[in-house]
Image (cartoon, grey):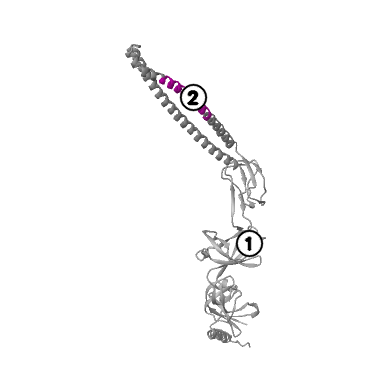
């Protein structure tokens, strides 16, 4: 006869055992975590980059990239508009002062000059005609005056003897009056002729003066017009390298149109774009340095362009007068240089190398080595440059820290080696 086995008790006992085991595991984990209070990670120390916290001179600077540009550039524009007839040079060519570069023609300007020359010649002819006419009139008046002088003297003599002749009954009283009237007439006519001679002389002199003034003005205008005509030949204002040449034979250039640029040789400045974060930290006169021909040379901010574009603003830097015998041999326009621009004076500080860890922690915490472990510790960072961070709290000199990246370690408190 089969015996019925009761399995309910067995299942109940197994269930209790499982529950108890679970409780034990939980208790072990709880007490383990309570004992350490930390989240741990085990790794090899060789996988990390270790650095030592040191006391050193901290140089507060930023590294920026700049391009060499000529210190001085002269822009060549069309002073007078015209059609390009000849281009005598090529872009990039070295030119010397007063060397012809481009020739233009301007028909309207040439016609204007011809018209002014014609007007000038006409006025000169008028002046010559006026002077000739004046001399003729003056000669005629002088002849008239000479004749009047003679007649007046004769009438004066007749006047002087007419009274005695009337008393002697040689001439009648009427004839005596006629002699007196003739004398008065000649006297008045003589005075009027003298006045006419003077007035005619003054009028002629004024007319001649006005025409001479007009001729002088026209000569000055002709000089200006010839100067304008000379502007149709574009010449190099100084010795340098011709760049940005924009001239094609047959092309019409308006007045003021850009034609080319001349860069002053052997003298450069640096233009650099800086992150807008530093716009209030950079001032004119701020110092820096860069490597030029394997030598460290001093450089300083000459001008700041505060307009921000794409998160950056531009600064212009000049080479310092402190540099001895600086030369720019081999330097090319647009060549890139790397500049260390000081933000403040150098001073002694507690520093740590700037590693990848900073990108993930922002300098708020770091792993510090101690007893074959690396323990997470809060720190505070002050100034920074591309190489070092200034430690203002949380670390001591000679402590060792991990400065390599902290990928997947954000929630870890202790790294065990």
Residue 44 visible in the shown view = no
Relative height, residue 215 to residue 321 (above, below): above
Relative height, residue 238 to residue 328 (above, below): above
Image x and y of residue 235, in percent: 62, 46
Relative height, residue 182 to residue 55 (above, below): above
Magenta span covers which residues?
A: 127-153
Relative height, residue 400 to residue 323 (above, below): below
Tally of marks: 2
Foreground tag (1 vs 2): 2
Image quadrant for the C terminus?
A: bottom right
Q: Which quadrant holds residue 57?
A: bottom right
Mark linked to residue 139: 2
Image x and y of residue 262, in percent: 62, 52
Image x and y of residue 259, in percent: 61, 47
Q: Earlier in the sequence, mark 1 or mark 2?
A: 2
Mark linked to residue 336: 1
- The 10 Å Cα crowd at callout 1, few under 14, some 14 to 19, many 20 or more, is some
């Amino acid at each position: 006869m089969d015996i019925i086995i009761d399995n309910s008790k067995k299942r109940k006992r197994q269930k209790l055992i499982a529950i108890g085991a679970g409780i034990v595991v939980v208790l072990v984990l709880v007490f383990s975590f309570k004992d350490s209070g930390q989240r741990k990670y085990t790794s090899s120390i060789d996988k990390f980059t270790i650095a030592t916290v040191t006391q050193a001179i901290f140089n507060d600077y930023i590294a920026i990239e700049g391009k060499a540009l000529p210190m001085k550039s002269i822009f060549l524009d069309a002073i007078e508009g015209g059609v390009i007839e000849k281009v005598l040079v090529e872009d990039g060519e070295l030119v010397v002062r007063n060397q012809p570069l481009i020739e233009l023609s301007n028909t309207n300007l040439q016609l204007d000059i011809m018209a002014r020359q014609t007007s000038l010649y006409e006025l000169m002819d008028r002046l010559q005609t006026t002077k000739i006419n004046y001399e003729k009139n003056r000669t005629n008046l002088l002849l008239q005056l000479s004749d009047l002088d003679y007649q007046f003297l004769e009438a004066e003599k007749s006047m002087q003897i007419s009274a005695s002749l009337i008393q002697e009954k040689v001439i009648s009283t009427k004839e005596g009056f006629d002699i007196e009237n003739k004398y008065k007439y000649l006297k008045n006519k003589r005075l009027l002729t003298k006045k006419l001679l003077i007035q005619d002389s003054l009028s002629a002199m004024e007319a001649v003066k006005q025409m001479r003034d007009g001729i002088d003005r026209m000569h000055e205008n002709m000089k200006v017009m010839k100067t304008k005509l000379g502007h149709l030949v574009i010449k190099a204002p100084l010795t340098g390298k011709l760049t940005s040449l924009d001239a094609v034979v047959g092309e019409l250039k308006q007045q003021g149109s850009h034609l080319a640029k001349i860069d002053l040789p052997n003298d450069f400045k640096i233009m650099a774009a800086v992150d807008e974060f530093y716009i209030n930290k950079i001032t004119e006169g701020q110092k820096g340095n860069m490597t030029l021909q394997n030598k460290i040379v001093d450089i300083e901010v000459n001008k700041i362009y505060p307009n921000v574009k794409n998160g950056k603003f531009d600064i212009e830097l000049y080479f310092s007068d402190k540099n001895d015998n600086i030369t720019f041999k081999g330097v090319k326009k647009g060549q890139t240089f790397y500049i260390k621009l000081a933000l403040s004076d150098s001073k002694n500080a507690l520093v740590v190398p700037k590693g990848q860890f900073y990108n993930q922690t922002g300098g708020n915490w770091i792993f510090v080595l101690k007893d074959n472990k690396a323990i997470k510790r809060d720190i505070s960072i002050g100034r920074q440059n591309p190489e070092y961070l200034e430690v203002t709290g949380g670390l001591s000199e000679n402590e060792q820290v991990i400065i390599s990246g902290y990928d997947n370690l954000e929630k870890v408190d202790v790294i065990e080696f």
